[in-house]
Amino acid sequence: MADGAGKLPGTGVAASPPVDYAQIRRFEAPFANRRYLRHVILGLCCLLFWRTYGSALLPLWFAVFMLAQFAYALVLRGLPESGPPLLMWRVLIMQTLNSLLFCLPGLSLWIAGDMQAWLYSLLFLTAGGLNALAMRAHLRAALRIDLAVITGAVLVRVGWLLWQAPYAPDSWMLAVAMLALYGVFMKAAFDLRGMRAQLQAHIAERDARERQRALSQFTGGVAHDFNNLLTVVLGNMELARLSVAPDERDALMTEAERAARRGAELTTQLLALSRNARLSPVAQLPASLLETVAGRARRELLGPWHRVTLRVAPGLRPVYADPEKLHSALLELIGNARDAMPSGGEIVLTAKPCPHGDGSALRFGIADEGSGIPEHLRDKVFEPYFTTKPRGQGSGLGLPMVRGFVEQSNGKMTVEPREGGGMQIWLDLPVAQASAAPGSGASGSGEARP
């Protein structure tokens, strides 16, 4: 086991961090993100060359090149999401093979000596350079391989020119022009790599500041809340100890108990936030669930100027979640919708099949007609103790607590603007198994299991 310094005991050698192969797969996958269009264009050019000059060299080469691309795709697919750096050799070997294959037709066309063939050869060289700038800048080792192959291709072309006609001025002019363009290309490649490194360092620094700010905000908020609650508890207990009137002593102890219960509620919120709350999921019918929540909201949260509308799709399967915490989460979101519409408005509660997936999840929605959340704050509203409400009107734990409960229940929560104004919040929660009857469930389970 590695020690705290990240070294293996007894070796003194730092353990290598795992490599993010998922990111490499996103950049390198030959047929992802419409990259297949490049292969289509390349294949059409090879066919055009064949029809124009009657040479089947490029179509045959294109077939071999595509086989290598498919092999590269299989190698990338076989990599884990994250793993040891040793697996990186598979990527580098396949990339070297593909780079050399791409370089070969350009060199053969250049050696052919025909002006039209030279034009095609320079197009191959230009395409290889652009591909290196566009695709390889994210990985230093991959960029070095491509640059080495391109360097070799340029030197072979220059050497072939000077060997064929060492005293011809045209050969020297073309060689100098190629070397000059090669120098510009290399400078652009290293500048791009440097800018990317600076950008990554800036992003890492910004993320570190954001994490530090969120941690300071969270710890400060927790300390402040518990300090207030303990002050109330200890103050009332001290006054109760000094009091001689039984009625006054009982009132003080009741106030201390109320503060202690608020502390217990805060602890429950923090457990939900950390995805460590104790859940007791059961199967519940979405229609009756939303009717119950809407009834409580009308009685306890909303005034006469707010109205609740239910939109429940027919034939929905039961949802599998902790009923008490799901009710609390929906009521919390309804309270936020109410606060976003101080002058009144409509709150829409929706239950429908989740549009993403195989029918194993239900989607609950809460929509309001308020002013919404500014785009630059939508990622921050899930941070603990971050609130857009005036001071004293929001704890900043509501949305983080709801998202913690949803994710612990194997669900997903999203926030997006609503057409026509306001916000739309979606809770995607798992459906119950076919054998689970509504209202049944295993009490005391740590996590929901659909």
Image: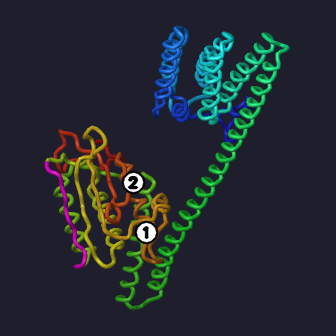
Give the residue drawn at x 42%, y 65%. Answer: 373
Give the left or right position of residue 335, taking residue 93 as reference.
left
Looking at the image, the residue that sits furthest to the left is: 315
Give the residue drawn at x 40%, y 64%. Answer: 398
| Viewport quadrant of the C terminus | top left
Residue numbers of the magenta segment:
304-314
Give the left or right position of residue 432, taking residue 92 as reference.
left
Q: Amino acid at mark 1?
A: Gly
Residue under numbered circle 2: 277
In the displayed structure, 211 sits above or below 245; it is above
For residue 311, the mark is none
User: Where in the figure is residue 137, as x and y percent of width and height?
Assistant: 64, 35
Q: Amino acid at mark 2?
A: Ala
Q: How many labels, in total?
A: 2
| Principal secondary structure, stretch drawn in magenta | strand
* Residue 74 makes an appearance in the image: no
For residue 263, the mark is 1
| Viewport quadrant of the N terminus | top right
Q: Secondary structure at mark 2?
A: loop
- Dot 1 surroundings within 10 Å: few (below 14), some, or many (20 or more)? some
Of residues 240 and 426, the one drawn nearer to the viewer in this rendering: 426
- Dot 2 surroundings within 10 Å: few (below 14), some, or many (20 or more)? many
The earlier-in-sequence mark between 1 and 2 is 1
